[in-house]
Image (cartoon, rainbow, N blue to C red):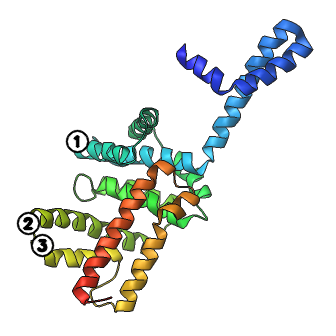
Amino acid sequence: MDNLFQQLRRYRAGVITGGLIGLLSGGPFGLFLGGGIGFLIQRGLSRKLQDYNPQQLFFRATFSVMGKVAKADGRVTENEIAFAREVMTRMSLSEARRREAIEHFTEGKGEAFDIATVLRPLAIVLRQRPAVKLMFVEIQLQAAMADGDISPAEQAVLQQVFAELRFTQQEVEMLMSRMRAEDAFRRHSWESHQQPGHNDASLLVDAYGVLGVSPEASDAEVKKAWRKLMSQHHPDKLIAKGLPEDMVQLAKEKTQEIQAAYDRVKAARGMR
């Protein structure tokens, strides 16, 4: 009953407009009939508009596809559940928004869920938003790596994601390499924090991988790669292009990680 009242209040403009039209044309009976029709029309239009709202689409697809990836192996591991919860915490979601994210994640775990239903409209709205599209895929790759390396079953789901969002094979290979380097960089950074000086050599190799360049790259190439990645992941630019505002923290963390990798490479090279 509470849910009904909440919906009536949310779509009250349609109820009032329809009710007034019904009252004028059909009296008291028309009032109720018109109000009901107005409610249904506004709710239907609102849901249809939401289907092509970039921020809502991104939010739903993020957690439903995450659920699909997590269930790809047949069962969802504790690490995968922990990662999804961690993402929600880092986003500082309200209780209502968190429940919505959990609903989408649960939807994605369902046997009948077809990720094309969320990816195809997402692909349309992100066609001219490559940086936001990149951010979406990076989140899914992190989710797939939550319980270790990416399994063949998870890889199959991710390949569908790449195909629906029109990533080339070269882009996929470069992205996978960079994301593995980021995962290693995070782990080695934590280990180095626990034992200063430990894994310094590995961290430097990881840092190059985060930037997507080889240790043999010139200083100019390193700086160019850093600038490109910082521009692609700049929180303000991503928000302007349709990234949900509650995901801005994820973008900030990404730029901090890119900057940390660049700083390590700069220090090793003596760059200014």
Looking at the image, which residue sits at the far front?
Answer: 272
Rendering quarter of residue 189: bottom left
Residue of label 3:
199
Type of amino acid at the residue the image marks with label 1: Glu
- Report if the CB atoms under discs 2 and 3 are less than 8 Å apart: no
Q: Using the image as rendered, state which of residue 194 and residue 209 is in the foreground.
A: 194
Find the distance from the CA under tag 3 to the CA under tag 1. 28 Å
Q: Report crowding for label 2: few under 14, some 14 to 19, many 20 or more residues within 10 A (C-alpha).
A: few
Q: Amino acid at mark 3?
A: Asn
Residue 179 to residue 271: above or below: above
| Rendered residue at 74%/21% (across/down) | 15
- The three-letter code of the residue at mark 2 reads Gln
Say left or right for 39 vs 142. Answer: right
| Contact, mark 3 vs mark 1 (Cβ under 8 Å) | no
Which residue extends farthest top? 28
According to the picture, the residue beneath numbered tag 2 turns out to be 195
Residue 50 visible somewhere in the drawing: yes
> Which residue in the rendered view is the most extreme toward the right?
25
71 sits to left or right of 57: left
Which mark is first along the chain, 1 or 3? 1
How many C-alpha atoms fall within 10 Å of the one at disc 1: few (<14), some, or many (≥20)? few
Image position, residue 144 (x, y; %): 31, 54
Q: Which mark is residue 78?
A: 1
